[in-house]
Amino acid sequence: MKSDDWARLIALSVLWGGSFFFVEIALTGLPPFSVVWGRVALGALALAVMLRGRLPRGWAVWRALAVMGFLNNVVPFCLFAFAQGEISGALAAILNATTPLWGVVVAHLAGAEPLTARRLGGVAAGIAGVAVMAGGGAGALPAMIACLAAALSYAFAGLWGRRFREMGVPPLQAAVGQVTAATVILLPVWLAVDAPWRLAMPPAQVWAAVAGIGVLSTALAYALYFRLLVTAGAVNLMLVTFLIPVSAAALGALVLGTRLGPQHFAGFALIALGLWAVAKRPA
C-alpha cells in the first residue's frame, strides 16, 4: 500500500476503535437503545448530507437494505452496547476482531468459499484466543458471548452485502441505505423500551460521545472504508481488524484509565494468528 493508504487505514482504525470508546462514555448517561438509535440516526443524516440526498431507489433495493441494516447495524450495535455495560470497550474491540474468522465459516456454509486447512486452523486459533480470554473471568462470559454474536452478525452481513454490486447500488448509497433502514427499524423499539421523554437530561460529554459515534465512527468511517476498498483492496483492508483493538485500548487507557489483563493480550495474540492464517494469500 502507498503511504496515503496507510494513513487512511490508521485513521479508520481510530474511528472504529473510537466507537467502543464513545459507547463507553455514552452509556454513563443513556441506556443502550438510546445510544444505538442516536448513532444510526446521526450516521444516516451525516451520510445523506455527504451524498447530497442521493438515496437508493426501488423497493427491491430497500428490502435488501433493510436486511443489511438489521444484520450490520441493529444486531451488532445493540449487542455491543449491552455488552459494554459489563466489559470494557477494549475487550469488546478484541472480540470484534473475530469477525473475519466467522466470515470464513459463514462463507463456507453458504457454499461461497472453500474452508481450506489453513483457514480452518486460523478459525481454531481464534476460538482458542476467545477461550483464553474467557478463562480470566466467568462473570463477563455473557457479555463476551454477546460480542461474539455481534461479530457473527457482521459476518452474515458481509455475505448478504455481496448482492448490492449486482443490484447496481454504489457503496456509499448502500451505506446510507442500511443505516437509514436501521434507524427506522430501531425507532419503535427505542420509543417502547427507553421512553426517551422520561429520561433525565444527560451531561454534555454524553451528547458529545453520541455525536462522535454517529458522525465520526459511523458516517465518516464508512466514507473512509469505501475509499480504502478502492485504493488498497479488500485483503489489505482486513489489516484494520488488527488495529481497531489497539486504538480502542489506547483511547480507553489514556482517557478512561481502563486496563487489559495478561489473558486478554494472550487471547488477542491467538486471534491475530488466526486472522493472519485466514487473510494470507496462498503461495
Image (tube, rainbow, N blue to C red):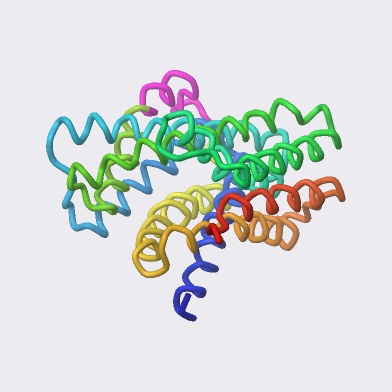
Closer to the camera in the image, 3 or 220: 3
Position of the C terminus, as image quadrant, is bottom right
What is the residue that sits farthest to the bottom in this orientation?
A: 3
Magenta segment's dominant SS is helix
Q: Residue furthest front?
A: 283
- Left or right of 78? Residue 123 is right
Which residue, as the protein is rendered here, is positioned at the far top? 192
Where does the image place residue 271, in percent across and percent down from the top left?
69, 48
Can you give x and y, in whole percent of width and height, for residue 179 in the image?
Answer: 34, 41
Looking at the picture, tell me which residue is in the foreground, 279 or 219.
Answer: 279
Q: Where is residue 215 in the image (x, y as percent from the top left)?
A: 41, 55
Would you place residue 184 above or below residue 132 in this image?
A: above
The magenta-colored residue range is 186-200
Rendered view: 13 above or below 161: below
Residue at image point 52% right, 57% down: 238
Task: Please say if 25 is above or below 252.
Answer: above
Left or right of 229, for residue 213: right
Q: Is residue 26 left or right of residue 137?
A: left
> At 49% from the left edge and 51% from the top edge, which residue is drawn?
213
Task: Report the residue at 44% width, 40% height from top.
Answer: 113
Tell me if residue 274 is in the magenta stretch: no
Residue sitting at x 43%, y 18%: 192
Q: Is residue 193 magenta?
A: yes
Q: In this view, does 195 lie above or below 276?
A: above
The spot of residue 225 in percent (x, y) is 41, 59
Q: Nearer the viewer, residue 204 or 86?
A: 86
Q: How many marks?
A: 0
